[in-house]
Image: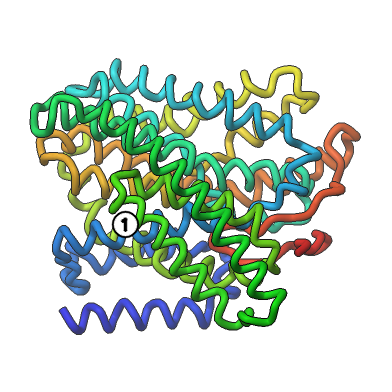
Amino acid sequence: MDSSYSLVLLLLFLWCLCARRMERFELTAPAAFVLLGLLLGEGTGVLDLALPHETVKVLAEITLVWVLFTDAARLSFRALRPELGLYVRLLGIGLPLCVGLGALLAAVLLPGVSGWAALYVGAALAPTDAALGATMMVNPVVPARIRRLINVESGLNDGIATPLVVLALAGVTAAEHTGPPDSAGHAVGQLALGAAYGAVLGLAAGWLLRTALRGSWATEDFAGAGVLALALLGYTSALALGGNGFVAAFVAGLAFGSAHGAPQRVLLYVEQSASLVSVLVWLVFGALLLPESFDHLTWQAGLYAVLSLTVIRMVPVALCLLGSGLDARTVLFVGWFGPRGLASIIFGLLAVEELTPADTRPLVPVVALTVLLSVLAHGLTSVPLANRYGKAAAARPTVPAAAAADELPVRGLGHRRGRGSRPTGP
């Protein structure tokens, strides 16, 4: 086991040395570590990651907390205002439609999946991960307005989907009589309490940090570590109060980001820490979750995975963007670039830990296969489709090549930007 841990650390360091070079081959960190997990995992026995269930659960929970908090806190509301209508359409109309259509098709296609379990599948596979289209997100050929639209949607939809996933898991537990009869109702109360507590915590912490920095009580060098602890504090303290920790972390991030007023580099430490544990989750996904899922794959799961990346994603996006002023080519481009990634993997790991094996057998394989197909499909199409769309968009005045709002950092890419993009304001 010690040698396996050493190998994982070595792989992380080697990736650090050659990450930029690998970008030229369109190989992202998620794709690389999924592949390494498959090659070195259970199939070959090189990498022994027989982790205790509690360890896997803690890794998944910490990763989700940091990702939710960071995605919410790094948003610039000033950057959102120019295209607020589009964000409301995608998140307020498109996302619920995606969850609903995904749940409906899961109930129809997947054997043994109905009701709460179908809602879980629809909600777990609704969030998108812009990092899987990393080369597209920093490609200056693609209009900044469209890159930002995809990026903001990716940053917020996992936080919005999390309550639905939590509620669905509680419903599955109640339906199987393994928990209290009112598990679903109790989960709703936890979600409400977590949201209220997260808002208070985030606003208070943001005001305290802003005051401490301006009064020279705090230093930016250590502020990042403090914010890292704050994200976990929101989760653990919400649980102690009887609320939902994930919702508390997400809402705390939103409130903190709107109140702290500190430079974006204060959040960089949290973002880099989240990126590190995210890579570990991708490795665990390839080494453990995928091999277990392959044993229970069905043709229905394969069909659903294909539909999830196409119909279930693209039809709701097309419907919610009707009348938005975007041309059909842009709508198709935004609809396609909705990769399923980190959030869906973590939701799958949470299902493994919270449900019985009989309950997870029809659920987790379809989530795992959808993510794997997304890693392959979006990784292979990121460059050619971005270049083709960018050239077409440059000739269309309806999608300007530049926008008046700031760029936002892409999850997993830190604050790197493509040429011609604008810096993020304080």
Q: Residue at x 79, y 64 (%)?
A: 423
Asked if residue 302 can be seen in this view, the reply is: no
Of the 4 image quadrants, the one containing the C terminus is bottom right
Question: In the image, is residue 277 above or below residue 175?
Answer: below
Q: Quadrant of residue 365?
A: top left
Asked if residue 179 can be seen in this view, the reply is: yes
Near-viewer residue (276 or 298): 276
Q: Residue at x 62, y 61 (%)?
A: 207
Question: In the image, is residue 369 above or below residue 299?
Answer: below
Q: Say which element carries label 1.
A: helix
- Residue 264 on image: x %, y %: 67, 66
- Residue 367 on image: x %, y %: 32, 39
- Residue 15 on image: x %, y %: 46, 76
Near-viewer residue (123 or 307): 123
- Residue 418 on image: x %, y %: 74, 62
Near-viewer residue (52 or 302): 52
Q: Residue at x 16, y 27 (%)?
A: 174
Name the residue carrying label 1.
Answer: 60
